[in-house]
Amino acid sequence: AGRLSDALGTPLPVGVPEAFTEPVKDPLGDLLARFARTNGPFTAQRAGARFGLGTAVVTGTLQRLTAAGRLVHGEFRPVEAGG
């Protein structure tokens, strides 16, 4: 809940326990890393659509996560020659 609130500015419902609202160092990075664990491979456009974020914001965060070794970037499904 805290990641959603901090990363996306989503208001939390009244009564959410304080344990779920603790701030984290990188809320958007954590949110996209969690998305990657359950939805990969994916495009920045797809992740952006999921969270209502612009592609540039998502791309920058994904590049930062890749540079930190938290994600891998590349083609995971090679295109066959001829179509």
Image (cartoon, rainbow, N blue to C red):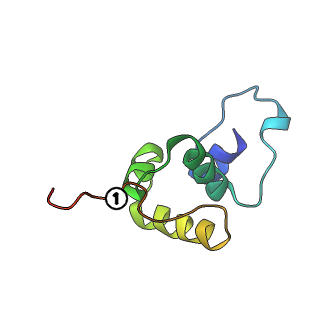
Q: Amino acid under label 1?
A: Pro
What residue is shown with label 1? 78
Q: Pick the quarter of the image with the C terminus.
A: bottom left
Q: Pick the quarter of the image with the N terminus.
A: top right
Residue at horizontal 76%, vertical 25%?
15
Vertical side of 1 occupied by 74: above or below: below
Q: Quadrant of residue 78?
A: bottom left
Q: How many marks?
A: 1
Q: Is disc 1 placed on a helix, strand or loop? A: loop
> Hey, which residue is sitting farthest front in the picture?
81
Q: In the image shown, does 15 or 24 lie closer to the viewer?
A: 24
Percent position of residue 79, x then y: 28, 58
Percent position of residue 59, x then y: 47, 66
Percent position of residue 53, x then y: 45, 54
Residue at horizontal 56%, vertical 63%?
72
Q: In the image shown, does 73 or 15 lie closer to the viewer?
A: 73
Q: Is residue 24 rendered to the left or right of residue 59?
A: right
> Hey, which residue is sitting farthest right in the picture?
19
Vertical side of 8 occupied by 25: above or below: below
Residue at horizontal 62%, vertical 53%?
33
Q: Is residue 77 rendered to the left or right of residue 28?
A: left
Vertical side of 12 occupied by 54: above or below: below
